[in-house]
Image: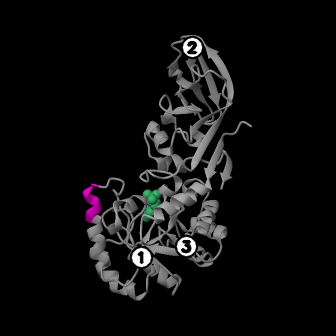
Amino acid sequence: MSTALLSIDLGAISRNWKALDARTGCETAAVVKADGYGLGAGVVARTLAQAGARKFFVAVAEEGAAVREAIGPGPDISVFSGHLADDADLIRAHDLTPMLNSVDQMLRHVEALPGHAFGLQLDTGMNRLGIEPEEWAALRDIAMRQKPRLIMSHLACADDPPHAMNTSQLKAFHQMTDGLDVPRSLAATGGILLGPEYHFDLTRPGVGLYGGLPFADAEPVVSIDLPVIQIRNLTPGETVGYSNTWTAARPSRIATVAAGYADGLHRTMSGKARVYSGAHACTIVGRVSMDLIGIDVTDLDHEPETLSILGSQQTVDDLADAAGTIGYEILTSIGGRYRRHYTE
Ligand SMILES: *Cc1c(COP(=O)(O)O)cnc(C)c1O
C-alpha cells in the first residue's frame, strides 16, 4: 500500500462537540462547511447528529444539499452565504435556511420562496458578510415582520481574547438586536471560549470540533501516516530533492515517503516540519514535492515502514506553525488522495 493513511476519530469529534456544548447554557450547532473542514461533511454531520446536534451550518447551498442527503429531514441546515442567484431550487429541495446578508438577498428570498425559513446575518465590524448597521436600521422592521429564525454575526478576533474588537463587536451586536424577539448567535469556537456574554441563544463551533485551536482542550481528531517507499544512504555533499536545497553534512539515511503538497503537505513545510517514528522526531529535508517528501532518518535505530506527520506527537496546529499557516488551512487542504479510515 503506497497511499498515505488518513485516520479520522469520529468519537473525538463527538466528544469535542459535547465538551464545547458543556461550556455554555445555550444550544450548540455544528459548522460542517468545506466538506466538514476537509474530513467528510456527510459522515461528520451524521456523527454529530447522533451526538445531539440539531443545527448545522455550511458556507454555500451546494454543501447544504450534500449534508441534507447525509442526515435526512429534521435538523436545520443553514447557509452562511445566504440566498444567491439560482439558489432557490436547492434551498427548497433540501429545506435549507439561508442567512440573508443584504436587502437584495432579502428581496430575492421573499420573492422566490415566500414563507420559506431564513435567518439574517449582520455585520458588526468584520466587513466580510452581513447587513451593515445603516442598512439594518432601514430594513429591520420589514425583516422582523417576515419572522427570521435566527439573527447572527461573526467575530473577527475571537482567537485573541484581550483584543478590543471583541467587546466592540459585542456592543454593536447588542445595539442592533436588543429587544428583538428572535434567537441570536455570535460565537464560533473562539467566541465560546470568550465567556457567557458572547453565547446568546446558539453557538456555531467549527474548528474546535476537529481538534484545532483556539480550543486548546480539544481531543486530536486527525492522524496521517506516510508510507516509506525507499530508504537510501547518502555520502556527505550529496543533495536531496528539487533545486538541491539540502546537502548531507554527514553520512545520512534518507527515507522517501509517499505524500506531498498535492496532499495538503504544503511546500512551505520544506526544511521545517517534522515527522515522527514513535516518539522520535525526524526532519523533512529538501523540497516537499507534489507526491514525495524526503526525511532524514539517520538517527533512527530501525527502518521505519511508516512515519507520522499528524497524530499524538504533532497536532494540526503544530504542523501549521511549521508551514507558516493555521490549523484550519492544514485540515481543509488534506485532499482526496489518502486512504481514509474512520474510527468510532
Ligand atoms: C467558519 C465559521 C464559523 C466556525 O468558525 P470556527 O472558528 O471554525 O469555530 C462560524 N461562523 C461563521 C460565520 C463562519 O464563517
* Residue at 56 percent of width and 17 percent of height: 239
Q: What x and y, as percent, mark residue 268?
A: 48, 35
Q: Amino acid at mark 3?
A: Arg
Earlier residue among tags 2 and 1:
1
Q: Quote the CA–CA distance across marks 1 and 3.
A: 29 Å
* The quadrant where residue 120 appears: bottom left
Whether residue 167 appears in magenta in the rendering, the answer is yes
Q: Are there few (<14), some (14-19), or many (20+) residues within 10 Å of tag 3? A: some
Query: Residue 273: image x %, image y %?
Result: 50, 33
Residue toward you, 192 or 131: 192
The CB of the residue at mark 3 lies under 8 Å from ligand 1: no
- Residue at point 62% right, 67% down? 50
Which disc, if any, is residue 327?
A: none
At x 35%, y 57%, the residue is 158
Query: Circle 3 — which element?
Result: loop
Say whether residue 297 is left or right of residue 171: right
Question: Label 3 belongs to which residue?
Answer: 54
Q: Amino acid at mark 1?
A: Asp
Label number found at residue 238: 2
- Disc 2 Cβ-to-ligand 1 distance below 8 Å: no
Q: Give the distance between the C-alpha atoms of the residues marked 2 and 1, in whole angstroms.
A: 63 Å
Up-down relation of residue 302 to residue 154 (above or below) = above
Main secondary structure along the magenta-highlighted residues: helix
Residue 56 visible in rendering: yes
Instruction: Please state, as top left, top right, bottom left or bottom right, where the C terminus lies in the image.
Output: bottom right
Q: Which residues are magenta?
A: 162-168
Callout 2 amino acid: Glu
Mark count: 3
Quadrant of the image containing the N terminus: top right
Is ligand 1 closer than 8 angstroms to the Cβ of mark 1?
no
Q: Mark 1 sits on what residue?
A: 104
Label 2 or label 3, whichever comes before in sequence order: 3
